Image: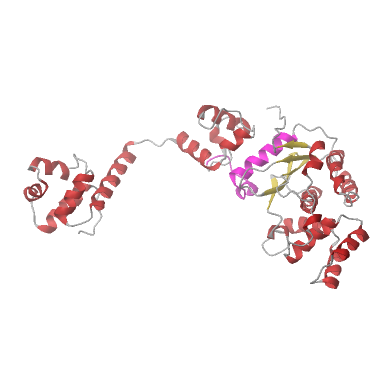
Amino acid sequence: MPTETHRSPGELIEALLRERGWDQAILGMFLGIDRTGVSRLVSNRKKIDAETALELSDAFGIPAERFLQQQQQYDLDLARMSARPDGRRLDRALLYRQLPIAEMIHRGWIRAENSRDVGRVESELARFFDVSNTSEIPILPHAAKKSDAEADVTPPQLAWIYRVRQVARQLVTPSYSRSKAMTATEKLRNLLLSAEDVQKVPRIMAEAGIRFVLVESLKSSKIDGVCAYLGSDAPIIGMSLRIDRLDNFWFVLRHELEHVLRGHGKGSFVLDAELDGERGGTGDSVTEQERIANEAAADFCVPTKSIDQFMARKAPIFAERDVLGFARTLHIHPGLVAGQIHRKTGRYELFRKYLVKVRSMISPNAMVDGWGDVAPTGA
């Protein structure tokens, strides 16, 4: 079989005829067709179907798939030459591939009957991303230049951030100042003993001029929180409560609050995902900005010096009475100690009964979007 590349099935047949020293009449004899029929195959005026491919395979002794593949490639090449690029169709396909349209409809983020209502979905996506038309939606490669922060997030994560901003716009808070945020940090520290005190968090954040919202994350986007701004002096802390657990709640909240205190995210936003893993630590894979926030969060939950001394004395055996006594000494909930032991040892089976769920406690006092509720956004 010839090894050179052929542009059409006709070229392939011609090359096979030359290789064998046949003329078209001999091939016609094999195929049971006249010379005109063979000429139509060679000139690509007759397409090779499955039956013809099998007959050619018998005649030339090569796989029938070779002829069908050549025909398919030829047809595709012809279509490419005659078709005009449709940028709108390409944009639509990319949006549907990358955004969880059906989930966004179900969550009430975009108003459409279903994802098949393409016209309605497109107009709603433009509204959701606050652009004049879908070609300007930030996830598209040719849209307005993305910031470094946007380049590092997935389309579902970016959609979540836009929803956080929409919900946060509905909150009215006094003006923000760093001194108010520092005061809020001290007030939060006084809530660490009782799990139920998480219900006071939204009010304390609001008093500091920080818009605090809870937005359930979209499926498969492992978001924990975000620090963003509506303006240079209007910070937002958005949390997903992806891990509904007391220790994780306080770690993520204090992490985001550190971003606010340091003015991180003013240019764009700071998205935090999978803080329960390596990204919640201080290793080489963590940026300086995130390392600072992680250290502040860990030290807030359980003072770093104290937990290190405790573990040095007690490891590798941690008795429950010791954990409870240590927590009482620090005036914090034992779940916070359990959480730090988990982070530092990887022994996630220890003291799990103290890892209290908090969403049901905080939701009644917070602006919430998700878990069956749709926050009013005025859009």
Tell whether position 268 is magenta. Answer: no
Q: Nearer the viewer, residue 165 or 316?
A: 316
Q: Is residue 332 visible?
A: yes
Q: Nearer the viewer, residue 141 or 37?
A: 37
Residue drawn at point x = 63 percent, y = 42 percent: 218
State the image quarter where residue 51 is shown: top left
Quadrant where the N terminus is found in the figure: bottom left
Q: Residue 53's spot in the image, x, y percent?
A: 21, 48
Q: Residue 142's spot in the image, x, y percent?
A: 52, 41
Q: Is residue 129 visible?
A: no
Tell whether position 152 is magenta. Answer: yes
Q: Is residue 75 left or right of residue 18?
A: right
The coloring applied to the image is: secondary structure
Q: Residue 278's spot in the image, x, y percent?
A: 69, 60
Residue drawn at point x = 45 percent, y = 35 percent: 89
Q: Main secondary structure of the magenta part?
A: helix
Q: Is residue 73 left or right of residue 113?
A: left
Count every numbered label the image shows and give the total.
0
Q: Is residue 63 left or right of residue 260?
A: left
Q: Residue 346's spot in the image, x, y percent?
A: 72, 64
Compared with residue 116, is residue 192 higher up or lower down, i.e. above or below? below
Residue drawn at point x = 66 percent, y = 41 percent: 160
Q: Which residues are magenta?
A: 142-168
State the image quarter where residue 32 is shown: top left
Quadrant where the C terminus is found in the figure: top right
